[in-house]
Image (cartoon, rainbow, N blue to C red):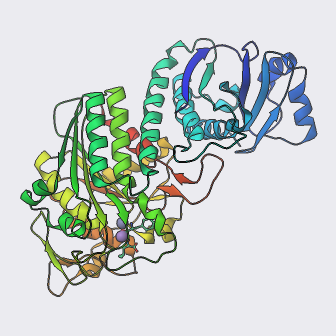
Amino acid sequence: MSLETAVLVEAPASHSTPLLILAVAQGELPSSLAEVDQCGGGALTRLYATGDFSGKRDEVAVVYPEGPAAKVMLVGMGKVAADQGTAIRRAAAVAAKRARTLGVSEAAFWVAPEAAGGIDPAALARSAAEGLPYGAWQYTALKQPPEDRRAPLERVRILLPQGADAAGDGHRVGEAIAAGQAFARGIQVLPGNECTPSFLGREAEALGERHGIAVTVLDRAAIVAEKMGALLAVAQGSDEEPRFITLDYAGADGAPIVLIGKGVTFDSGGISIKPAQSMEDMKFDMSGAAAVLGTFEMLGRLRPKVRVVGLIPSAENMLSGSAYRPGDVVRSHYGKTIEVVNTDAEGRLLLADALSYARRYQPACVVDAATLTGAIVIALGHVATGVMGTDDALVEELRRAADRAGERVWPLPLWDEFRDLIKSDIADMKNSGGRPAGSISAGWFLREFVDGFPWAHLDIAGTAYSDREDPTRVKGPTGVGVRLFSEFVLARAS
Ligand code: BES
Ligand code: MN
Ligand code: ZN
């Protein structure tokens, strides 16, 4: 069950609600809230006088005033920046996450004009519509409800100032992106025994039916017929059949944007087995696939004028008597041969065949998202996604889209010198270059299968899931990539 939002042109002072959320910048009580404060019997003045709250980023205070709002939550946005979209999205998420403990099913959300930094109402509505459901997200389906469970927050009205009647369009975009993010997180969170390659195939088909998007799912026999030798090598150790999923959203004619998502539903490492510590997190190794599916959920709801093809190569990386082994040489879909020196470098094998398959679309560009390397976590932590590619303009376009989306993305170089890392004695390349520049050698491997189109690669291993709770989210899946992909494709729509 997810949080719904709606826009309403109404002043916060007169709005009657069980919970009024006020997003404010760092500093004194904003003068625009004087009327709200008066209606509430001066509760806000008293709060600020205590020094308990000053509007720092992520700071939250709840007061119980008189008047039309039973509870008032202040949420801090920190200092006002040039573009407040990201701060509004974040404050909305922080507030919605905190509101879950307040036992209200409805609330209203207002950004003090002093904190809005002149953002137009449509953009404000959009940011709030993205942030509120993001903060409220949680996954409870596999747990008994706690005895002291409180009513979940179900509906938030985003209050807007007079003259903001056209903000509904911005809200609609934000709502669709939020739905895409929630969809992605809902798939990411599923355990590997539930979320298998065939499950992903069925989810894609259901999505296609919901939205009238063409979806094709290749089973093992069809993948064999396609000669996707790299994908098949990864899949051969598992009892779960691989799938190769295609989604084709044709909102416009012409060369499509192709989005590829790594869909390893569980990564044990194979014969080059991973250590037991945190191996359970490898159920998140299909987060690239989830980002692509979430983006198509957005596309299905918004129906923008753009053509987007999604490709999801999906397999489980396991150990067994039939598993591929270190030293094996496999022939990829493209035709190049690969020496498998490490069965844990499996994601690039799936992606290689997807990149090769993408050629038939004569794409305008190809962008892949993959939980590809532990090395990116060493380089950029859990803060930023790494980006690299063959086309500087495309990388720049993605970075700008990420800025608007409030997702951090940082570039790594694919210089020729790094190619040496994946030289093989007996095949066209090997699948691992070892520890030095681990994210770049993985990028270089993918580049070997990029032929005739601008391409960029997003390494989301550090950003796809969170190993701890923070102010905007629970521990677990982040839905990373959905907002970035959405910004990217919507900016290319005519
Ligand atoms: N799925 C992992 C990468 C990963 C690591 C994702 C940590 C999320 C968190 C990937 O398949 C992998 O195992 N990569 C290896 C490559 C190495 C063998 C060259 C790695 O990073 O250790
Ligand atoms: Mn691996
Ligand atoms: Zn993996």
Q: Is residue 392 left or right of residue 227?
A: right
Percent position of residue 8, x then y: 59, 15
Percent position of residue 477, x then y: 50, 51
Write the residue at 37% across / 56% down: 286
Q: Is residue 452 left or right of residue 413?
A: left
Write the residue at 19% across / 53% down: 453
Ligand 2, seen in the image, is in the quarter at bottom left
Q: Is the C terminus in the top left, top right, bottom left or bottom right quadrant?
A: top left
Q: Is residue 215 left or right of residue 491?
A: left
Percent position of residue 351, x then y: 25, 60
Write the residue at 90% across / 20% down: 41
Percent position of residue 300, x then y: 32, 30
User: Does residue 202 lie above or below 212 as drawn?
Assistant: below
325 or 41: which is nearer to us? 325
Total numbered badges shown on the rendered structure = 0
Write the residue at 92% across / 31% down: 46
Q: Quadrant of residue 240?
A: bottom left
Look at the image and tell me whether residue 491 can be seen. no
Look at the image and tell me whether residue 323 can be seen. yes
152 or 460: which is nearer to us? 152
49 or 151: which is nearer to us? 151
Q: In the orientation shown, which residue stands out farthest toward the left?
A: 225
